[in-house]
Image (cartoon, rainbow, N blue to C red):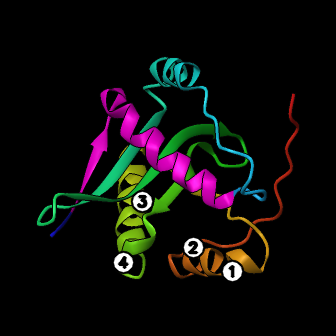
Amino acid sequence: MITVEQLDIEQADLVLDLVTRLLEELREDANIPVALNVEKIKQGWEANQDRFTAFVALDEDEKTTLGIITLVESFAIYADGSYGVINELYILPEHRDKKIGKVLIETAKEYGRQCGWRRIEVNAPLGEKWERAVAFYLREGFAHSGPKLRFRY
């Protein structure tokens, strides 16, 4: 049986492990290791506990972790106030095609309704390698809303 639990900062190591696996899969150069600044991330989570949340999907029968989704609350005029952003969604490869992603997206949607959000946004990677991810979000009711650009310091 699949269950979903909301995690808090006490489970940060589990969240960071799963997000590291996601980042390893997304990186363009497999020779460059993913190195998270764990202390900085934990401090940021601590400071933003009212805006950041993580949910983990578990197989209660097997006592195993299946995947994770993280959300942050943002605010914009175009969104009519507060809205959610999915920052990370990761399903362990051996558990894909078991509807785990759908379960986590439904959890995020319900959480957003409870928070009073009118929308949830997500960025999906572009390119042939990630067509399956984009198709998944489209099946779950998301729509294209344009490219996202970033500036790094």
Provide the secondary structure element on which disc 3 rests.
helix
Q: Are marks 1 and 4 in contact (CB under 8 Å)?
A: no
Provide the secondary structure element on which disc 4 rests.
loop
Q: Is residue 17 above or below residue 96?
A: above
Mark closer to the chain start, 1 or 4: 4
* Label 1 to label 4: alpha-carbon separation: 17 Å
Quarter that holds the N terminus: bottom left
Q: Nearer the viewer, residue 122 or 131?
A: 131
* Label 1 to label 2: alpha-carbon separation: 10 Å
Task: Quickly name the residue at label 2.
Answer: 137
Residue 71 is a magenta residue: no
Residue kind at label 1, given as amino acid type:
Glu
Mark closer to the chain start, 4 or 2: 4
Residue 7 is a magenta residue: yes
Q: Is 59 on the left-hand or right-hand side of 81?
A: left
Q: Which residues are magenta?
A: 3-26
* Label 2 to label 3: alpha-carbon separation: 12 Å
Task: Quickly name the residue at label 1.
Answer: 131
Give the class, few, some or many, for how many residues have Cα within 10 Å of label 4's Cα (few <14, many ≥20).
Answer: few
